[in-house]
Image (cartoon, rainbow, N blue to C red):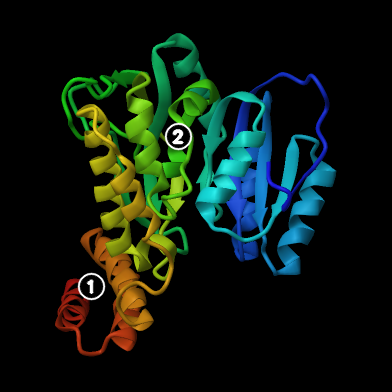
Amino acid sequence: MTADVTVAPTLPGTSISISVVMSTYNDAAYLAESIDSVLGQDFEDFEFVIVNDGCPDPATEHILAKYAQRDSRVRIIHKKNEGLTKALIVGCESARGEYIARIDVGDIMTPDRLRRQAVVMDKHPDAVLASCWTEYCGPNWEYLYIKTSETSDTPRNAAYRVDDAISPRQPADITGGPTCHPSVLFRKAAYVSAGGYRPQFYYGQDWDLWYRLAQQGKFACVEAILYKCRIFPAGVSMSNIEKQQRIHECSRGAFQARQRGEDEGPWLERAAAIRPGGCGKPQQKCSAAGYYFVGEALRRNGDAACRSYFLNALRSAPFTPRNYVRLLQSLVLHR
């Protein structure tokens, strides 16, 4: 633990099953809803480690202090701002549970999430990670789509599925991987053995970890919606798509190098060079792409709310033809 980190005191010798780890930075408006969804679990044997990643907004610190005072399961870690990956490294290092579960601010988990994922992991000691189905929503909780596991050869009435891990002898992509980063619950022992989140990956730190965890054991997926993820048009995932893709190439390249017994160092150096500094386009165009993405998902669902997102996309990028086309289609559809 670095000298720039302040950790709330814990009870010595306390043994718990699950540590939920979350990082927060300048998102006070969504913080309480996410915290409440964790504290409302029907499974009580957990701690909630929240890393305040140097947020300058006093509202965030006030909210965190209020919850820590109200519920002894909440542990707050204060550190200087260094981004999500380093915040997760600190949070997972501090975690005392047998399992580590993730959640992002702005999202929620269903009340039975931790219990159902823990049951799967307890039943399958060869599994190192359990995901679940994820419902993706717009910023106002508009339904967009549901993402299930990548494989579809399991009966729908199955309580769980354990997918084969990546073969240590043949380079391949992950099949049946997590439906989103914070949908996962993984064994801390496997996380430590794999090397944990790596600071070279400012973006896409999840896929780098999945490749290494898959070499430790199998992935499981609870076939039910246990996690709801919100997509914000100006969020990190929307405004840094190109960097996310480049990072994924690095994580896969590093994996393939390890498979061949080669040095993965060059791939880590490439990943370390991908850092914040704009989305590669003007910020308005980045936001426009996010508005278009949400609007198009709503349009395909027949939801008239898509119009407002297409209008925002037009305001941000008035010379992009597809924004006009989709807006006209939405008007004809809902006339």
Q: Can you say whether 282 is above or below 150 in the image?
A: below
Disc 1 marks a residue whose amino acid type is His
Q: Residue at x 20, y 89 (%)?
A: 319
Q: Residue at x 67, y 35 (%)?
A: 94
Q: Position of residue 161 (x, y in %)?
A: 31, 20
From the viewer's side, name the closer residue of 38 and 270.
270
Q: Tell me, yes or no, if residue 136 can be seen here.
A: yes
Disc 2 marks a residue whose amino acid type is Val
Q: Can you say whether 327 is above or below 82 in the image?
A: below
Q: Is residue 300 left or right of residue 76?
A: left
Q: Is residue 4 left or right of residue 263?
A: right
Q: Find disc 2 in the rendering and name its residue.
A: 184
Q: Find residue 287 and report its image quarter.
A: bottom left
- Quarter that holds the N terminus: top right
From the viewer's side, name the closer residue of 146 and 197.
197
Q: Residue at x 67, y 61 (%)?
A: 54
Q: Find residue 83 and report its image quarter.
A: bottom right
Q: Which mark is residue 27?
A: none
Q: Find disc 1 in the rendering and name its residue.
A: 334
Q: Nearer the viewer, mark 2 or mark 1?
A: 2
